[in-house]
Image (cartoon, rainbow, N blue to C red):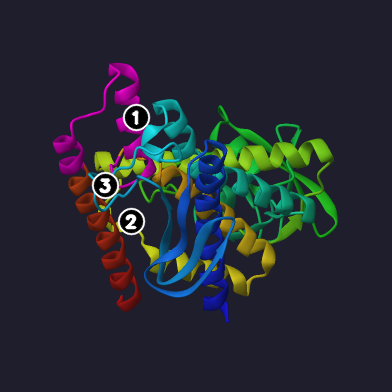
Amino acid sequence: MSWLVSLLVLSALIFFHELGHFIAARLMGVYVEVFSIGFGKKIFTFRAYNTNWSISAIPLGGYVKMKGQDDSDPTKKSFDDDSYNVKTPLQKIFILLAGPFANFLLAFVLYFTIALGGPNILSPVIGEIIKDSPASLTGLQTNDRVMSINGKKVSTWKEMAEHISTAKGSINLEIQRNGYIEFKTLTPKITETKNMYNETIQRKMIGIGAAGVTHKLKLSPIETLSYASEQTMFASTLIFTGLKKLILGEVPAKELGGVISIVKITSDASADGWMSVLFFAALISVNLGVLNLLPIPALDGGHIMFNIYEFIFKKEASEAIIIKLTIAGWVILFFIMGLGLYNDIIRLIG
């Protein structure tokens, strides 16, 4: 059942991406011939709004086929009034940006829904204590709750960790233990750890792990909007930074995941409840938006690149260059997908 949920989530995210293209194309007066979820053999088709809507056998993406636009053969063009080819570069860019924008908008809506439901967040309750660490030497104990650091109240594990990592010199902890308040003074120690990109970094720490205790965030209407905006921006920055590090070799290629990873993460999340599913759906939606903005000719970003060239130089790039770059783009895209799939399989059998 959880795998079915994963497939439905992935299909919904693809649908919203293509819906963005579809709506923008129709607004610009472009005839949309086909709206497909999936690739390959069509297993279900119907016609509505003067477009053929299809579900195809391979659910690893989707496409909107506009009149005069064919990625498999860039030479196939139409110059009718309702064709993609006769639109100005800015109109084409508007159509191309609409897909990624739909993914970012959907992510915002999902994060907003999570905020309305009261997202679970890690409480500053101590679990594991590392031997001979500042926390151990000071007498901190499992199940101690950190109430404040240097007089500043903390309500989440993230807030507590940020206070510790940015502290200068020693810090004063207010601890709640068995219903009583105690105060501890200790000095954080610079320690090697791993960040979210699995890179080794140096960070000030006191040698504690979270107990896994969570609580619900209670947010006002303004805080709900702020939460949704911040989470969407954070996810976008996270993915952009991860891609940059991957390209520069700062993060090993083995960290790249493919569709199996996406399905597995969503499947695991479904076992933890609908809030987890919404959270990962929002993250994957941002991921789709970011990836489609990459300047690879097979993706929206590549087409945007060609249209920016046309807008600046008042002429289209040569047909031969477009064909060569498009082929190169497909090669790059299939290589990335293949590498992600290979890493997924290695993780599964490992």
Outermost residue, bottom direction?
1
Task: Give the number of the mark in front: 3 or 2.
Answer: 3
Q: Which residue is mark 2?
A: 256
Direction from residue 328 to residue 333 in the image, left or right: right
As drawn, 341 above or below 165: below
Is residue 145 shown in magenta?
no
Residue 194 in the image, given as x and y percentages of width and height: 41, 49
Q: Which residue is mark 1?
A: 307
Whether residue 130 is visible to the viewer of this picture, yes or no, is no
Q: Residue at x 35, y 75 (%)?
A: 348
Mark-to-mark CA distance, 2 and 1: 30 Å
* Residue 183 x/y as whole percent: 75, 42
Badge 3 local density, few (<14 within 10 Å), some, or many (20+)? few
Q: Nearer the viewer, residue 137 or 225?
A: 225
In the picture, residue 92 is in which quadrant?
Answer: top left
Q: Earlier in the sequence, mark 1 or mark 3?
A: 3
Q: Determine crowd level at label 1: few under 14, some 14-19, many 20+ residues with C-alpha closer than 10 A.
A: many
Q: Which residue is mark 3?
A: 76
Residue placed at 61% from the left, 43% from the top?
105
**Residue extent of the magenta highlight:** 296-325
The kind of residue on which mark 2 rests is Leu
